[in-house]
Amino acid sequence: MDDQFLLTNKIAVTLYEEYAKDMPIIDYHCHLSPKEIYENKQFATITEAWLYGDHYKWRLMRANGVPESHVTGDASDYEKFMAWAKTVPMTIGNPLYNWTHLELQRFFDIHDILNEQSAPAIWEKVNERLTSGKMNARDLIRDSNVKVVCTTDDPVDSLEYHQKLLDEGDFNVKVVPGFRPDKGLELNRDLFAEWVGTLGEAAKIDIRSYDDFLRALEARIDFFHQTGGRVSDHALDRVLYAETTKEEAAGIFAKALNGEKVSIEEEAKYKTYTLTFLGEEYAKRGWVMQYHMHAHRNNNTRMFDALGPDTGYDSMNDEPLAMPLVGLLSALDRSGQLPKTVLYSLNPKDNYTIASVTGSFQGGGIPGKIQFGTAWWFNDQKDGMLDQMKALANLGLFSQFIGMLTDSRSFLSYTRHEYFRRLVCDLVGSWAEQGEVPNDLALLGGIVKGICYENAAAYFDFGLKEGGGLVEASGQNRA
């Protein structure tokens, strides 16, 4: 993992060193805690920074025979770190092998291979750096050349820490909320009615009807907008579409609010109308809508009961995609209110479906209005990233791709952008080496810079100036 890591030809090296390496980062979808950013969290140990909440690592530790006590249980931080160090040599071929060592190199200047023998010394050196007061949460973000962090937030969230960051005004990274209304879509879940009540309290609307519910969602969208929000996100684990009317959707909503289960047909109608309503509201405000599709969550019932969600027991879903996805996008397009949209699937079988669907809804004078989102979650590895980029290049405009995001809960994950950028440069450099595209560095370098940063800066309304700086404003409207 030297300077030419993943770069297999001279053009790729030039593209990376001269065009990609120093570009800023827009992390437009992640799961960082705005509270930890505001409070400038200091990590006591590398375990806290690395292993708390990282279900990627947890899955591999379990597969290596590590007991749950040393994964999510009551073992000490040192014991958990040593369990991960023992696992790392076994992860060869998995992206975590590279990510682990990139993070040690870039953040801690440690170039040793992590294993059981090296772990004690690495533990001491890394923890000394983490507790120095110079590697707190904000330092890790700032030192990674990040310009925007877009968190993932429930519509009922107070956005207290986003607002405090706005009011404070001395952190030169924009931390903006992402509107994630999944709990309002999943009306068959046990806590649906309770969540609707909480939404009403947040919006100061007594929700007794579907109209009340939609008004409350709209009020919260406005609140997010005032706090800098310009992005929504939806987990569509199963993509559904069914023609319906507002009256039908209202009846289904009332049934669910009363604690009754609804059929899959009713769920499809409710979700179709509600998602269409939300999409139109996003379009009115110039937001970007994201669909994260085809996750199969919480597969292991026993472990879900013990640990809850997001603990490493998810997988890919393989439901049909083309017809319901086209239905949703077409419904918004018919009304002239299809917002800028980013589409991701957890199942790589959907790559060419998504790449072709995006081409059916481009337009409005917006470059890359409908985006095939970067390789996501289980696809977030060398082959997955290359497969996604090649599908996009084969069927659309790779040059308008908005590039990488971390989708992470870790402040050390920004090296994933480096990993991605090296692959972008190697792919483009290989095309040039093979004579498929001209060896024109001005052309190729401009495309690389676009994918690394500039396309996203133009696509999202985050108030970025040319060159990566921030547009200054004051109070709530600093967005």
Image (tube, rainbow, N blue to C red):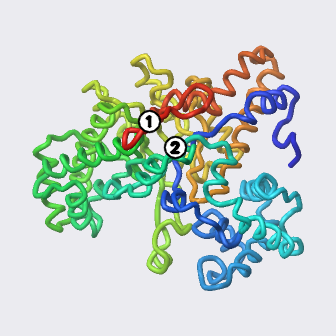
Give x and y (percent) for residue 429: 79, 27
- Splitting the image into 4 quarters, where does residue 65 fall? bottom right
Please provide percent x and percent y for residue 105.
81, 54
* Dots 2, 1 in contact, CB < 8 A: no
Mark 2 vs 1, N-terminal side: 2
Q: Is residue 133 left or right of residue 90?
A: left
Q: Between residues 228 and 132, which one lies in front from this camera angle?
A: 132
Asked whether 130 or 315 is in front, the reply is 130
Q: Secondary structure at mark 1?
A: loop
Tell me the quarter of the image containing the C terminus: top left
Q: Is residue 143 left or right of residue 202?
A: right
Q: Nearer the viewer, mark 2 or mark 1?
A: 1
- Residue 312 left/right relative to 232: right
The residue that disc 2 covers is: 174
**At x 83% / y 72%, what residue is drawn?**
119
Q: CA distance from mark 2 to mark 1?
A: 12 Å
What is the quadrant of residue 95 in the picture?
Answer: bottom right
Label 2, residues with CA under 10 Å away: few <14, some 14-19, many ≥20: many
Q: Position of residue 428 (x, y in %)?
A: 74, 27
Identity of the residue drawn at 72% across and 58% down: 96
Amino acid carrying label 2: it is: Lys
Q: Is residue 403 above or below residue 102?
A: above
- Number of residues whose C-alpha sits closer than 10 Å to that of mark 1, classed few (under 14), some (14–19) or many (20 or more): few
Residue at screen point 81% across, 73% down: 124
Residue 347, percent from left and from top: 54, 48
Is residue 401 visible to us here?
A: yes
Q: Say which amino acid is labelled 1.
A: Ala
- Asked which secondary structure carries label 2, the reply is strand
Q: What residue does disc 1 label?
A: 473
What label sits on residue 269 in the rendered view? none
* Camera sees residue 229: no
